[in-house]
Image (spheres, grey):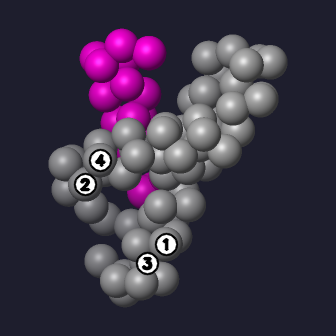
Amino acid sequence: MGVILLIIVGAAAGFIATRVMGVEANIVITIAVGIAGVFIGGFLLRFIVNMLGATAGFVAGVLGAILLVWLYQKYRGRS
């Protein structure tokens, strides 16, 4: 995945994750959470990503970002 594609997918995944979790975050945090979520989701769901392709990568990114938002809320409190 190229850096530009990673930023685009991460931004989209972070946006969806913050909206699903009801968190208001600035654009930098949203993109950072999304990119980290793409890495975490890709790592955790590597087998599915290899089987289903880019769509699974996006879903894994959203799930990873949701996990990070949940952890953030649990340990830092609601924004």
* Mark 4 residue type: Ala
In which quadrant of the rendered view does residue 8 lie?
top left
* Mark 3 residue type: Gln
**Percent from the top left, x then y, of residue 18?**
42, 57
Q: Is residue 75 above or below residue 54?
A: below
Residues at discs 2 and 4 in contact (Cβ within 8 Å): yes
User: Which segment is the magenta one?
Assistant: 1-19
Residue 46 is tagged as none
Comes first in the chain, label 1 or label 2: 2
Residue at (41% x, 73% y) in the render: 72
Q: Is residue 27 left or right of residue 72?
A: left
Crowd tier of the residue under label 4, counting other residues whose Cα lies within 10 Å: few below 14, some 14–19, many 20 or above: some
Crowd tier of the residue under label 1, counting other residues whose Cα lies within 10 Å: few below 14, some 14–19, many 20 or above: few
Comes first in the chain, label 4 or label 3: 4
Circle 3 residue: 73
Circle 1 residue: 71
Q: Is residue 75 left or right of residue 66?
A: left
Circle 4 residue: 32
Residues at discs 1 and 2 in contact (Cβ within 8 Å): no
Residue at (25% x, 54% y) in the render: 29
* Mark 2 residue type: Ile
Q: Is residue 12 above or below residue 1?
A: below
